[in-house]
Image: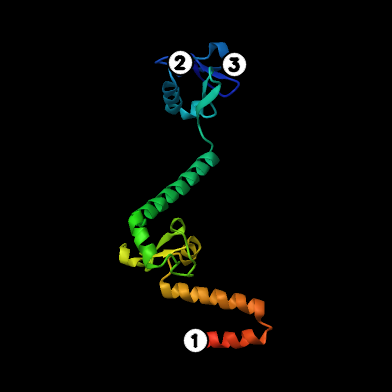
Amino acid sequence: MAIVITDGTRYISGVTPGSKGVKIENAAEAYEFTDANAAIQYMQSDKAFTLYYYVYDTVTQKIVWKWLEPEEVARIRAAKAVWKEAAKENGLRKKNKIHRKMYSNDVKKLLYKEANGKCALCGREMTLDQVTLDHIIPLAKNGPDRVDNLQICCKGCNLLKGAALPEDFANRVNAIFLYQMERKYAHKITWKFASWMLRKLG
């Protein structure tokens, strides 16, 4: 590794314990530092003298270190602030993450048998491998993570229900049903009568 300090045109040369050196244009006479850290320390010891220079590795042909422009410093600080905020938010999410119990296949089979293999929300018959377990009172609403708070659902209903309470879910489904039927059959007298009856029951 050959570490030098340059601005792309001139080089630092003649560095000794008693002298900070001089700036020359001949690359062959550039002072070679023992490692990158030594070159960085030299740069930081006299910012005014090395302001527009950088530490350069002549083997890899890469810039190892340089003084940053004020705009670059501002961009880096802004990026760090965003990163810290994201890390903080992610930490809060992890802290508040709900830990679910893993239930055995025996529990799933028991609930499947009790429900006669039908989704608790839409009534569709399912095979055992189509079953998902749903918390009747969601964990997000402080529902207990116990077998007596579980029901079997098809995947679609489970996703639709999300973290809604049973009554909220029923109201949501009713609202969707009425709206979709209204769009499709609004002009039919039979729907107007059926709609009136449904709203009265609701």
Q: Relative to residue 85, is residue 136 depicted above or below?
A: below
- Please report contact status of discs 2 and 3: CB closer than 8 Å, yes or no: no
Q: Mark 2 or 1 closer to N-term?
A: 2
Q: Relative to residue 54, is residue 167 depicted above or below?
A: below
- Is residue 99 visible to us here? no
What amino acid is found at the position of numbered circle 2 in the picture?
A: Val
**What residue sits right under mark 2 in the picture?**
15
Q: Which mark is residue 30?
A: none
What amino acid is found at the position of numbered circle 3 in the picture?
A: Glu
Q: Mark 2 or 3 closer to N-term?
A: 2
What whole-number distance in Å separates the C-alpha atoms at marks 2 and 1?
Answer: 93 Å
Quadrant for residue 19, please give it: top left
Q: Relative to residue 147, is residue 87 depicted above or below?
A: above
Query: x, y (%) of residue 134?
Result: 40, 63
The residue depicted at 43 percent of the width and 19 percent of the height is 35
**What residue sits right under mark 3 in the picture?**
25
Q: Relative to residue 114, is residue 67 depicted above or below?
A: above
As helix, strand or loop, the secondary structure at mark 2 comes to loop
What amino acid is found at the position of numbered circle 1 in the picture?
A: Leu
The 10 Å Cα crowd at callout 3, few under 14, some 14 to 19, many 20 or more, is some
**What residue sits right under mark 1 in the picture?**
201
Q: Nearer the viewer, residue 35 or 180?
A: 180
